Image: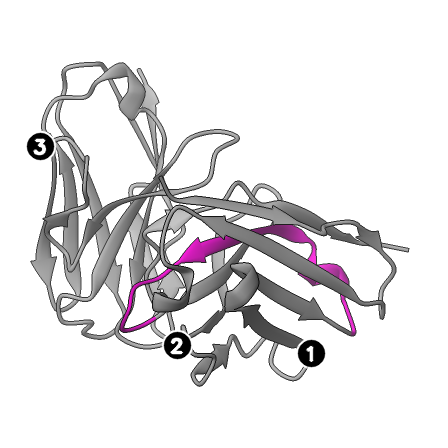
Amino acid sequence: QVQLVESGGDLVKPGGSLKLSCAASGFDFSDFYMIWIRQAPGKGLEWVSYISGSSTDTDYADSVKARFTISRDNAKNSLYLQMNSLRAEDTALYYCARGDYYDGNWAGFWGQGTLVTVSS
Amino acid sequence: EIVLTQSPATLSLSPGERATLSCRASQSVANYLVWYQQKPGQAPRLLIYEASIRATGIPARFSGSGSGTDFTLTISSLEPEDFAVYYCQQRSNWPTFGGGTKVEIK
């Protein structure tokens, strides 16, 4: 069955950097768009970024553009999110999710999330 | 950015009752509307996509309807496990979510 397991969340100071990882299993990873979605504590959901199976198509929310970089390693069935210049408003539970073959704008399966806290 | 407004914010119902949740878009999203269910401490789960198609394994008591700017998620007869928060999401433009509707036990 589809499994997505996030890791890398931590407490980081404003201006700092962090790299999240997502290990995928149970499906042909390279065939699918992959997505990062976040949820601030007690708040709603925000689409952060997506990447195509071949890594040729990526996009970002305006709120993270130029600070975050999404990438993947199909040989390792892994998805990543490099987060730089972190701000307090980036504090959230970050979910890794699977899109479909054609696009990354809906999420069929979700991981359990990894918590990022940005605070001094 | 397309803004999705969900109503009501909270719906208090008893098991066996019908739940009707609304999602309104600030501009047309055609049928590119998705519904998710989130229970406390869990990740969201896909329920409905393209406004009315149930995802694999989703019970028939869940149904979605609508197109353009007005959408509805209906749970025909609430089961105890259906009490949760429901989010709509549009995928016509950069994806955005509604603020959620909490379905709570009355």
Element marked by disc 1: loop
Q: From the viewer's perspective, tell me whether residue B101 is left or right of residue A79.
A: left
**Nearer-the-camera pick, A30 or B6:** A30
Q: Residue B60 — which label?
A: 3
Query: Residue A89: percent from the left, percent from the top?
Result: 69, 61
What residue is at 49 percent from the left and 51 percent from the top?
A24
- Spatial distance from mark 1 to mark 2, Cα to Cα? 20 Å
**Nearer-the-camera pick, A71 or B87:** A71
Q: Amino acid at mark 2?
A: Glu
Query: Which quarter shows the N terminus of chain B?
Result: bottom left
What residue is at 85 percent from the left and 70 percent from the top?
A15
The answer to whether B53 is drawn above or below residue B9 in the figure is below
- Spatial distance from mark 3 to mark 2, Cα to Cα? 32 Å
Element marked by disc 2: loop
> Does the magenta run of residues contain A99?
yes
Q: How is the image coloured?
A: one colour
What residue is at 36 percent from the left and 30 percent from the top?
B84
Region in magenta: A85-103
User: Residue tagged by mark 2?
Assistant: B1
Of badges 3 and 2, nearer the viewer stands: 3
Q: Residue A67 — which label?
A: 1
- Spatial distance from mark 3 to mark 1, Cα to Cα? 43 Å
Q: Amino acid at mark 3?
A: Ala
